[in-house]
Amino acid sequence: MTTWVDATAGASGDMLLGALLGAGVPLEVLRGAVEAASPEPVTLRVEEVRRAGLAATRCHVEVADSTTHRSWRDVRRLLVAADLAEPVRVAALGVFARLATAEGAVHGHSPDDVTFHEVGALDAIADVVGVCAGLDHLRRRHEGPVVVSPVAVGSGRVGAAHGSLPVPVPAVVELLRGAPSYAGPTGAPPAELCTPTGAALLVSLADTWGPQPAMDVEAVGVGAGGRDPATHPNVVRLLTGPGVPTGPSAHPSTDPAADPYTELVVEANVDDLDPRLWPGVLAALLEAGAADAWLTPIVMKKGRPAHTLSVLVRPELAERVRAVVVAETTTIGLREHPVTKRPLPRQVVEVQVDGTRVRVKVAQHAGRRITAQPEWDDVAAAARATGRPARAVLAQAQALAHDLLDERHPDP
């Protein structure tokens, strides 16, 4: 399942909430996560509106007279203590870590010393947690990549806690480093089109950037912003549906060296982090777009035990990974080197084990099938649903996948 986020008119937290609701995420999913994370009452009010003639969903985040500014430490404590699903917690922490890192870079502060102003109140916490919960709901139903369009950021100036700022404001510029952005629709009046919260969410959600990929669109959500300019619909669109293979990728080469590409390995040696934190660090890195992340036990100078944290990531997502490593570990520096990846041709097939779906990743080499590995999360879920041992589910899924592929494409 592919998700495409159209941010060509800009983005904010409430616009993304509206788009998720319009795409079919139940309001209760967003409301439950927001209530779990908010120390004060927050109400989500949904309204159907029109923007430049287009029907759209507006999600109002209503907070009763709260002007509390919170530091990154305060927000982190709230999220860590909240009764949230772990993927939602990790994603929300990653969004605020990026916000803190960007604000710190702009104002010359350590991220931990940043006090959020426009993004620190309860409505922004609700935006971030609600969007992360909505996307997690979509991914639980249909796992797949999230593609985000180039982001419209606006022009002119805007009033802020630090006075009148140019648009895009410095925090948005910092957050969108390495991501495609532009001023906005032709003829649009000067205005801020992308907020810091919106930028941080887009950067956190995106697996890659670009126009709508080839896909069979099944659901469309249109999330409305507060303004209704005459020049363009002030909306974020969210499209979901199965991806459609096109071009060379529809018929992958059997030569594993045919399509090599370059990724980065980002590393840091860490000897003073509580080891109980490492699982959360690895999860945050994967959520940030890393292709892989792992730990290697090492012995450093003076005989100190430590770990090397290694992260494999596409160059365009490296800044997101760097931000997570700096925010979530105690390292004071990183090293990087490019590596060449030579992936084997692969495909994913689905089989049914006692009525439960299990996806199986199949790889080829020199035109022959060499592995058929079921996705472990699906195996574990099927084992729980059927009451069977996981090893039995694993073996049956592999056998079913081989049988299915033998029927479609017998090995020569």
Image: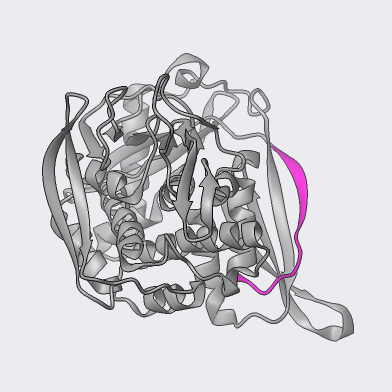
Question: In the rendered view, would you say 185 is above or below 60?
Answer: above
**Is 15 situated above or below 5?**
below
- Where in the figure is residue 297, as x and y percent of width and height? 71, 73
Where residue 108 sits: x, y (%)?
68, 63
Look at the image and tell me in which quarter the N terminus lies: top left
Write down the quadrant of residue 407 in the picture.
Answer: top left
Residue 387 visible, this angle: no
Task: Check if residue 309 falls in the magenta segment.
Answer: no
Q: Judge whether residue 332 is colored magenta.
A: yes
Q: Nearer the viewer, residue 177 or 251?
A: 177
Q: Is residue 362 above or below residue 309?
A: above
Boundaries of the magenta span: 329-340
Residue 31 picture quarter: bottom left
Q: Which residue does the image show at 49% across and 41% down from the upper left?
A: 157
Give the image quarter of residue 295. bottom right
Give how far across and how far down residue 305 sits, in percent.
Answer: 75, 82
Residue drawn at x 43%, y 47% is 195
Residue 176 place in picture, x, y as percent: 55, 43
